[in-house]
Image: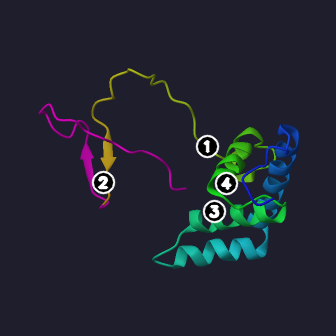
Amino acid sequence: MNGAFSSSVTDSAQARLLLAALKVENRMRLSPEGQAAFAAAEEKDDDDWMEAASRMQFQSLKEVGLAPTARNVALLRATALEHPEIALYVRHNLCRQGELQVGDSAPQGLELYDLDGGTASFPLLAEKKVQVFFAGSVT
């Protein structure tokens, strides 16, 4: 298959291929070679474990006959979220849904880390300026 999915590929066939790719990815992550790739990436200044994982995801798509495209990687990652019983890294994710809802005011007095490793308390400024925060986990 040289495209994302051809129109002749059914949804069930697509799902089977993505599940197969997820199993390949999990095998790759757990293999001695995969673990060595993660360790080597962490030793480099221009690479990290997330990039190593991404390379494994592209390779796992190739192994099951899917085009290694950004769209297919996104579908693979969505499949991982739907199947934590297969995706080790999803199964052991300790993230929890908090109590904040869309439209709630941000909590006051939070300690935030900036990109340089420094800290600041929220709100950062008493002035009425737009503040943008990006949050996520690198682990």
Residue at 33% across, 28% down: 106
Residue at 63% across, 71% down: 38
What residue span does the magenta drawing correspond to?
116-139
Residue at 74% across, 64% down: 29
Marked residue nearer the N-terminal end (1 or 4): 4
Q: CA distance from mark 1 to mark 3?
A: 21 Å
Label 1, secondary structure: give it: loop
**Quadrant in the rendering for residue 69:** bottom right
Left or right, 121 with reference to 89: left
- Type of residue at label 4? Val
Residue 73 drawn at (x, y percent):
67, 54
Q: How many marks?
A: 4
> Which numbered tag is attached to residue 29?
none
Label 2, secondary structure: give it: loop
Marked residue nearer the N-terminal end (2 or 3): 3
Which is closer to the viewer, label 1 or label 4? 4
Q: Which residue is mark 3?
A: 54
* Within-10-Å neighbours for mark 3: few <14, some 14–19, many 20+: some
Label 3, secondary structure: give it: helix
> Which numbered tag is attached to residue 94?
1
> Which numbered tag is attached to residue 114?
2
Marked residue nearer the N-terminal end (2 or 4): 4
Label 1 with label 4: CB-CB less than 8 Å: no
- Type of residue at label 3? Ser
Label 4 with label 3: CB-CB less than 8 Å: yes
- Type of residue at label 1? Leu
Left or right, 124 with reference to 100: left
Q: Which residue is mark 4?
A: 73
Residue 19 is a magenta residue: no
Question: Can you name the residue that lies furthest to the left here?
Answer: 127
